[in-house]
Every structure is written in C-alpha cells, then in structure tokens.
Amino acid sequence: MQAIEWDDELSARIRAAFPAAAARSYLQQNFVESPTATVKPLIEFLRNTENFDMLVDLTAVDWWKKDSTADYPRFELVYQLYSFPTNQRLRVKTRLMENEAAPSIVGIYAAADWLEREVFDMFGILFQGHPALKRILLPEEWQGFPLRKDKSILAMDQNWVRDHLSIESGQ
C-alpha cells in the first residue's frame, strides 16, 4: 500500500496531541496509525475533541507469516470512526503482538461491546477492561478462532460439529 502523509488541520491537531501517531492517506481515505499504548486516549480525543461521535466498525487483520519467528506484530486492529458534524470518516489502526491485549474502548463507545466480542470470537484478540469478553457468534465450547490464518478453515473444530450436530463436517 502506497500511503502518503495526510496533512491538514485535523491531522496536525492529532500529531500535536499524539506525537507517536502517524497520519496517512490512501486513495483519499485518511487513517491514523497509533501504538497500542496510546490508541485508547487517541480514540477518546477523536470523540471528545474532534467530534467523531460514532464507532462505525471495529475489525482486525491477521498478518500471520508461515515462516516467521513470531517476533512481529501479528494483528492489526482497525477502528472505523465517523463524525456527523463534519461528515468525515477516519480509520484508526494499531498493531498487536500475538498474545498482547488491546485496551477496551467500551467506555468511550458503547457499540464497542459487541464489536470487541466479535473480534475476540473470530481472532482470539483479548480486550483488557472489557466488561464481559466472551464469544458472541460461536458456541462457548468452540475450539480455535476462524479468522486466524495459521489454521485451515477445514481444520476448524470438527469435533464440536460431530458432537453437537451428529454429522461429519461438510467442510
């Protein structure tokens, strides 16, 4: 991805408040990359100071590498924010090591409750401070995380399917 530096009044205010954050743009879509330690204060700043009053979505990307030594940030969390007053969208990204927890933003956006649970359920990413982090789409007994790239979808919890549906997995 060939992103360019995003430079306007909003990005200048973000960089002034969070010097470790990088403001970039790709195909006129602005985003901010932030270290995990400052992503929660950054999102709170964007909501309270810059009027990004809606969390549209929260998802993750698994950058798993088969031949890696696992000493790189495996996951990327992507927060999609929207400002009704300015009609602007902004993406906030942070990278996580495999066993690193992300800070929960449920206290900033109530919608993050279910979105963080979905990311946990699909990727196994933990959210520190989440009020009830548990599976939301799959059964509690399910083994594994379907959107991780280190295991084939065909190797997902076939035991659960056999035990609860009395069939061999059709995958």
Image (cartoon, helix red, strand yellow):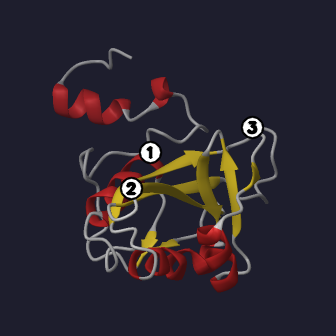
Q: In percent of the image, x 41 and y 46: which residue is there?
A: 122
SS class, disc 3: loop
Estimate how packed mark 2 is, as few (under 14), some (14 to 19) or many (20 or more) residues with alpha carbons within 10 Å: few
Q: What amino acid type should be assigned to the residue bearing mark 1? A: Phe
Residue 34 appears in the figure: no
Residue 155 vs 139, above or below: the answer is: above
Q: Residue 167 placed where, x, y %?
A: 23, 19
Q: In percent of the image, x 69 and y 76: which residue is there?
A: 15
Q: CA distance from mark 1 to mark 3?
A: 17 Å
Q: Nearer the viewer, residue 38 or 60?
A: 38
Q: In percent of the image, x 32 and y 45: which residue is there?
A: 142
Return the residue found at the far left.
165
SS class, disc 2: loop
Q: CA distance from mark 2 to mark 3?
A: 41 Å
Q: Is residue 134 left or right of residue 20?
A: left
Q: Nearer the viewer, residue 105 or 10?
A: 10
Number of numbered discs on residues: 3
Q: What amino acid type should be assigned to the residue bearing mark 3? A: Lys
Q: What amino acid type should be assigned to the residue bearing mark 2? A: Asn
Q: CA distance from mark 2 to mark 1?
A: 35 Å
Q: In percent of the image, x 60 and y 80: which residue is there?
A: 38
Q: Nearer the viewer, residue 54 or 130?
A: 54
Residue 130: give its label.
none
Which residue bears the numbered disc 3? 66
Look at discs 2 and 3 and give the one toward the viewer. Answer: 2
Which residue bears the numbered disc 1? 145
